[in-house]
Amino acid sequence: MPPFSRTKAACTFHDRVNLLALPVLGTLALAGLLGFYSATKVTNMFVMYIVADALWIWVEPDALPSLPIVVQAHHLVTIVLLIFPLRHPEFAHFTCWDGIVEINTFFLIARRQWKAQRQIMNWCYWATFLPMRLVLYPYLLFRFWFALEGFGLERLVVVACQFLLCGFNGAMIYASTVRRMRRLGSRDDLWGLANLTPSTPQEKAAYKQSQPQPVVIRAQAGY
């Protein structure tokens, strides 16, 4: 098998495993927030998942389409962050707050693998990315800071890790924006939320008819 095919196969297999695992993790995190499932068990499951995925990527970097070092750094920060709820189970619900973002990660992978549903997966990705990664995560910075008063160094470590995760989210949207701008060559449809360019002859004809027609003023005799 050519190297490119092996790389693609490794990435596809890793994606498919995550398409099964991430909905479970995201759903359990949500259930933990609502009190339907033990937040401590959610924390333990996230630790096992992150460690297993980090080992997988370390053994086979081709399991990711790009930037395995960045993802490994993200996993390391997450593991350090999870140490706190492991040591203090009364704060395990914080794992659930951070963990529901895996719903967004699911849509990220789904739009890459499910070509026929790419458009709807892209909508779902951005609809969850903005509130979860750009609103919830920065909010948790302040929530952690005030909730962990009296925990000294552990408080600083938790907040620092959350800050790094926020930075990772910012890097994600920056990379996505730059990549799309390069692909499109303009700022139109920056996030792929619409398909405004007519492609088929029927679409082009309909688009032409929808445009305002020029008004021609003709000179009348006698004027």
Image (cartoon, grey):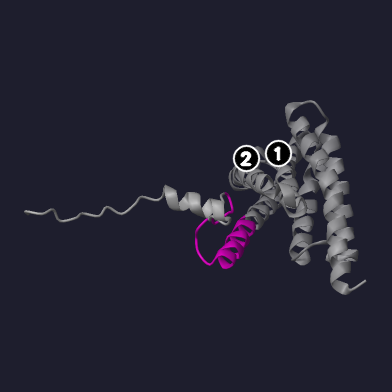
Query: How far across and how far down the image is residue 55, in percent?
Result: 89, 59
Q: Mark 1 belongs to which amino acid?
A: Trp
Is residue 78 in sight in this rendering? Answer: yes
Q: Residues within 10 Å of mark 1 (few under 14, many from 20)?
A: some
Report the residue at 83% width, 35% height from top.
40
Residue 188 is one of the magenta-drawn residues: yes
Q: Nearer the viewer, mark 2 or mark 1?
A: 1
Magenta residues, dominant SS class: helix
Q: Is residue 180 above or below residue 99?
A: below
Query: How far across and how far down the image is residue 87, in percent?
Result: 82, 42
Which residue lies under the disc numbered 1?
97
Which residue lies under the disc numbered 2?
143
Classify residue 198 as left or right of residue 45: left
Q: Residues within 10 Å of mark 2 (few under 14, many from 20)?
A: few
Q: Is residue 65 above or below residue 82?
A: below
Secondary structure of the residue carrying tag 2 is helix
Query: How far across and how far down the image is residue 131, in percent?
Result: 60, 42
Residue 64 found in image quarter: bottom right
| For marks 2 and 1 on the same chain, the one whose residue lies earlier in the sequence | 1
Classify residue 158 as left or right of residue 42: left
Query: How far across and how far down the image is residue 34, in percent?
Result: 73, 27
Task: Report the span colored magenta.
Answer: 170-193
Residue 10 is one of the magenta-drawn residues: no
Q: How many angstroms separate mark 2 from mark 1 (CA)?
A: 11 Å
Is residue 196 in sight in this rendering? Answer: no
Secondary structure of the residue carrying tag 1 is helix
Report the residue at 77% width, 26% height from top.
35
Question: Could you tell me how many numbered marks the image carries?
Answer: 2
Report the residue at 72% width, 40% height from top.
100
Dots 2 and 1: beta carbons under 8 Å?
yes
Judge by depth and name the residue closer to the eye, 96 or 108: 108
Judge by depth and name the residue closer to the eye, 4 or 70: 4
